[in-house]
Amino acid sequence: MKPSFLRLFALLFFSTFLLRAQSYKPPVFTDPERMKKIEAVLPTIDKIYKEYAEKNHFPGFTYGVVVDGKLIHTGSLGYTDLSKKTTANTQSLFRIASMSKSFTTMAILQLRDAGKLNLDDRADKYIPEMKNTKLLTADAPAITIRHLLTHAAGFPEDNPWGDRQLADTNEELLKLLQSQVAFSNAPGVAYEYSNLGITLLGYIIQKVSGKTYQQFINENILQPLGMTHTKWEYTEVPADKLAHGYRWRDGQWVEEPLLHDGAYGAMGGLITSIEDFSKYTAYHLAAWPPKDDADNGPLKRSSIREMHQPWNISGFAPNYKYPSGRPCATVSAYCYGLNWMRDCEGREYVGHSGGLPGFGSNWRILPQYGIGVVAFANLTYASTVPINLRVLDTIIVSAKLQPRQLPASDILKKRQKELTQLLPDWKNAEASGLFAENFFADYSLEALKKEAATLFKKAGKIVSVKEIVPENQLRGRYLIEGEKATFWVSFTLTPENPPLIQEYHIGEVKK
């Protein structure tokens, strides 16, 4: 093929890909009964948010609730510009500070997936100015991209210093590196929050892609998701949409000066609205659970789920209590530009907060439940994490939500049917071909028969066998209901092809 034809072919291919990405819409799941329960809680949610905003002196405040791929509810209070009395709304554009970090890390994963870099590459491969960096100890490993993604590079925690560097240029950033940065840890041994680390990822995006990180994120994340009103530079925002930032001092609001966009914007510079950011929230929720559907978003679903994994443990709160007073220990970790938390009930939260002079924000999703919330305030370091956790807890408890059910695999359903047919007498079980080679070495057949016979006798006539509830694609649990009692059966399959039963348990459902 002639070079001109090659260029034309490449242009057409890229245009087709971009058009596909730009038309991306997260799937919207509809469960009328579930939605009805959630909608019944929304007036309570409005009251909770309103009281919290007033108590904490938020000049302006706006929030949204995302369920199953859709922004279902919003609310706004106060003003984005106190002097002009401009009321806050879901199209008001707030600087979201460190909520920007996951956009930068998503861009890094896009470059990784395209084969342009490796997460375990040394950072100085892309930033030569780091080659002579003197690390904390002589045996310290080189800083990698993965260290930067997970706050494990050894840099010191740099709030609020980093918040004042937003407008610095690349030249100033490189000058800092050349001056020998101070370290608090050796790379790879501890979690310590670093705005500088994420800023360096922004510079790596530029070096690898040939575009500024702002251009790259605009073209490859914001535009495909339809976040058309989201900006980096505040002077590009229409005056009636821009949220001004304030500090509460001596009983009154004092306006904070806005900083221009610069090198550090990669860690905290985005300016967006509830309506725009809800699209990003829905996109993250749509990555769960893993599925066979078309994967046509800006980043592969598997890579989004990778972003959500806990890579670097950051805290443990054994005495944590939900706002209702219910004690529930939590453990937290940092992912790729995101926070992760699991509580004592097994709920897993993913999201990030943001704080700058003049602003405080937070978004939080529960992938298991398909729900998320977003909240922006224009008050310095406004505390929005506690209120979002309270709102999510209120929705789950009040609406009596259950985690989204993983569909049972065909092999689970097949093995359930075959196992049930053997109960309670286990006739010809050893010759059935259903059980792995370990099974009858681990279980006494006579004991299995006796256990099952006792439960079936207590249950009386069998009324129904419920569908299996999968824990994963090779493990599940189901109920057998009798006239007098109900019992459960669980089993686990092997990795063989076809999978066989390697573990089995049965027991009565206690009333």
Image (cartoon, rainbow, N blue to C red):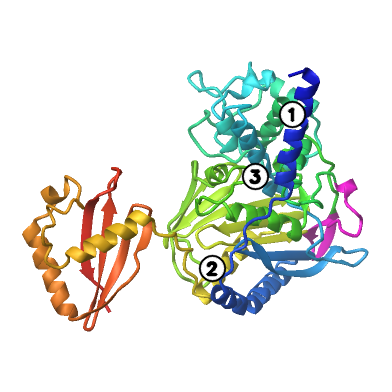
Position of residue 236 in the picture relative to residue 126 (left or right): right
Which x, y percent locates residue 50?
71, 73
Q: Secondary structure at mark 2?
A: helix
Quadrant location, the N terminus:
top right
- Disc 2 marks a residue whose amino acid type is Asp
Report the residue marked by disc 3: 102
Report how far apart the C-alphas of labels 2 and 3 lie in the structure: 24 Å
Report the residue marked by disc 1: 10
Residue ranking furthest to the left: 446
Identified at 80% across, 34% down, the residue is 168
Q: Is residue 155 visible?
A: no
Residue closest to the eye, 302 or 153: 302
Disc 2 to disc 3: CB gap under 8 Å: no
Report the residue marked by disc 2: 393
Identified at 64% across, 57% down, the residue is 282
Q: In the image, which residues are magenta?
A: 234-255
- Disc 1 marks a residue whose amino acid type is Ala
Which x, y percent locates residue 199?
69, 35
Q: Secondary structure at mark 1?
A: helix
Quadrant location, the C terminus:
bottom left
Q: Secondary structure at mark 3?
A: helix
Q: Is residue 41 above or below residue 402?
A: below
Which x, y percent locates residue 284?
60, 52
Q: Which mark is residue 296?
A: none
Q: Quadrant of residue 412?
A: bottom left
Of callouts 2 and 3, the N-terminal one: 3
Q: Quadrant of residue 55?
A: bottom right
- Disc 3 marks a residue whose amino acid type is Ser
Residue ranking furthest to the front: 1
Report how far apart the C-alphas of labels 2 and 1 lie in the structure: 49 Å
Report how far apart the C-alphas of labels 1 and 3 lie in the structure: 30 Å
Identified at 50% across, 41% down, the residue is 312
